[in-house]
Structures are given as structure tokens and as C-alpha cells.
Amino acid sequence: MQTRTIGQNGSSVSAIGLGLMGMSDFYGPTDEAESISTIHAALDAGITLLDTGDFYGSGHNELLLRDALKGRKREDTFIAVKFGVMRSPNGGFGGIDCRPAAVKNSLSYTLKRLGTDYIDLYQPARLDPAVPIEDTIGAIAEMVEAGYVKQIGLSEASPATLRRASAIHPISWLQIEYSLLSRGIEAEILPTARELGIAITAYGVLSRGLLSGHWSQQRSESARDFRAHLPRFTGANLESNLALVESLRAVATEKAATVAQVAIAWILAQGTDIIPLVGARRRDRLSEALGALNVDLNPADLRRIEAAIPPSAVAGDRYDAGQMAMLDSERKG
């Protein structure tokens, strides 16, 4: 497994991380036994970075990870946890709470559910509009000082927020959506992160399945799958985006690779400070994703890939209007 460096202390993580969200929530029915087998396969393949959130399945995802890690050495894994999103008993959402007291309360429950003494990286999933980022980062910094957290991250943050947060405590990474279909970070966010020495953990590298090469116009999602409500997956937008995927498939075929492998390899090629998270829920999908490490893209390949999916041709926003409004990363100025 290739490795990449995050944080100013030079921590090393696997070049590809495993995002666990879909094993508990958001993408319809799940298979717990297959999820645990997939986590085991990832660890056996050399993946060290495991990304979860305390609100994924209202704690289920952390409990799943705890079970999957039984018998494994804690120091062999890098566990990243997102917090701050509030859930209701019926699975709904109740806003964001990143007050200092809430930070410490959430962390205490996470440590208990995961059965560990520390979290490698802790980050707010979204910014709390009612709480200055300085207060949230300051509270996590206290937990770093106390030994419960090793490093601090941010998610979907703007350049201004990155600067404000970094003034309080070093920020190791920014977790943000980045793929051939979502390249908005390239203009301002990525340059700012690099200026500040902040790595990027890219989620949605397959655009929630659109770039997997396995999606089709005929596929229908259950009400439990939030992709059924995303603009890129609906109506004419889906048809247009799938046409882009077919353009990418032509390049992938020439490289003797799959569409997903080329999409992930493109992310890997954007810089050694960028770590893609793959959301594989099954061992076969994980194996396919890991094959991206063997796809060598030269400058001509990169130009062809980017020509196949020009940013201006992507149809629809990455979230619905309500969720887009919550993203600090989408705010201008």
C-alpha cells in the first residue's frame, strides 16, 4: 500500500482511505456481515485510514467499526471521526451543534462506542452557524492536550474558515467532496489548504456511484437512499451525467481499467497531499477501487480524462438546495 502524509507532525496514512458511512446509513439497506468483511479486507490490503461519523446510523457505524477491529492492534489504524450533526429517533436531522460542551460530550460517547482511548483525527462534519469556529477548534484542542484526540480536521470549510481555524490550532486535513464531477475546490480552497500545509481527504470521488461505471438510467433507489433526492441523479441531469461517464469509459478501456479505477487514479494524480476516500460497502467494490493504485496516468491521459468530463458539462448541484446552503465551502467571500 502506498502512503501519504498529513499534518505538520508528518503522520502517514494509506494513500486510499475507506469511508464507512454507507455501511450504516444513507444508501439504503446494509449487510453488516459483508460490511465487517469489507473492513477486514481493507485492513489486510494495507488501508489504515478508516473514516466514520458519530451520526452515521446514530452511532451504529462506530459500533460496527468497533466490532470489525476486535483482535486488531489499535496503532495499526488511523480512525477519523466526524461529529456535530444531530439526529432524531426517526432518522431525521436536527441541525448542527458544535458548542464546546457538545464537542466534549460527543467525543466521550464516541470513545465509548469505539472502545478506544483516543481518536486519531476529530472534525466537525459541518460548521455550526451559531458557534465561532475558534470556539469549536479550541474545544477540540483541549482534547488534544488531554490526549483524547491526536489531530484536528475540518469538513467542507471555506478558505476564510481554514485560516481562522489554523490560527487556533494546526489543521491536519480538510475533508471535502472532490471528483471529476465536483472540482469546485480547485479555484480557491485547494490553493489555500496547500498554503497552510493542510492535506485534502476527498470524499465522493465516485460521485456517490455516478462515476462507478455501474450506474444506469433504469436504476431506481429506495426512499432510504438519499441519492434519489440529489439533483445529479434526477431526470435529464442523470441522463446528461451518465453520457459523461460513457466518455470516460472510452478512456478507461484504452487503459485496461474500469471507469471507477480511472476516476480514483485521477484524484491520486492531483497531488500527494490528496487522499481519496472510497465508500465501498462490498469486498468486490473495494478490490476494484484498490486497482486504481496500479493505473498509471501520464499528462496526456490526464488531459483526455479532463476533456471527457469538463466541469462546465456537469448537470446539477452535488446536494439539494437546503444542504448546499449549509456548506461553508460554497460560500463566497
Image (cartoon, grey):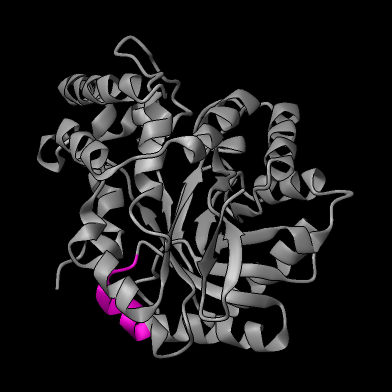
Relative placement, left or right, of 232 versus 6 is left
Query: Looking at the rendering, in which quadrant would you find the C terminus?
Result: bottom left
Relative placement, left or right, of 196 versus 71 is left
Residue most extreme to the right: 71
207, 319: nearer the viewer = 207
Query: Magenta stretch mostly in which secondary structure?
Result: helix
Residue most extreme to the top: 218
Q: Is residue 160 magenta?
A: yes
Residue 121: quarter of image: bottom right
Residue 295: quarter of image: top left
Residue 197: quarter of image: bottom left
311, 234: nearer the viewer = 311
Residue 211 coordinates in the image, percent (x, y): 35, 30
Q: Is residue 267 above or below residue 114?
A: above
Residue 234 coordinates in the image, percent (x, y): 25, 24
The answer, for residue 209, to whether it is visible in the render is: no
Residue at point 38%, 15% (across, down): 220
Q: Is residue 221 above or below residue 326?
A: above
Residue 60 coordinates in the image, percent (x, y): 68, 45
Residue at point 36%, 36% (across, down): 263
Residue 36 coordinates in the image, percent (x, y): 74, 36
Q: Is residue 231 above or below residue 21?
A: above
Relative placement, left or right, of 149 versus 139 is right
Total labels: the figure holds 0
Residue at point 48%, 68% (across, down): 97
109, 118: nearer the viewer = 118
The answer, for residue 323, to whether it is visible in the render is: yes
Residue most extreme to the left: 312
Q: Is residue 245 magenta?
A: no
| First to last magenta residue range | 157-164
Residue at point 51%, 80% (across, down): 8
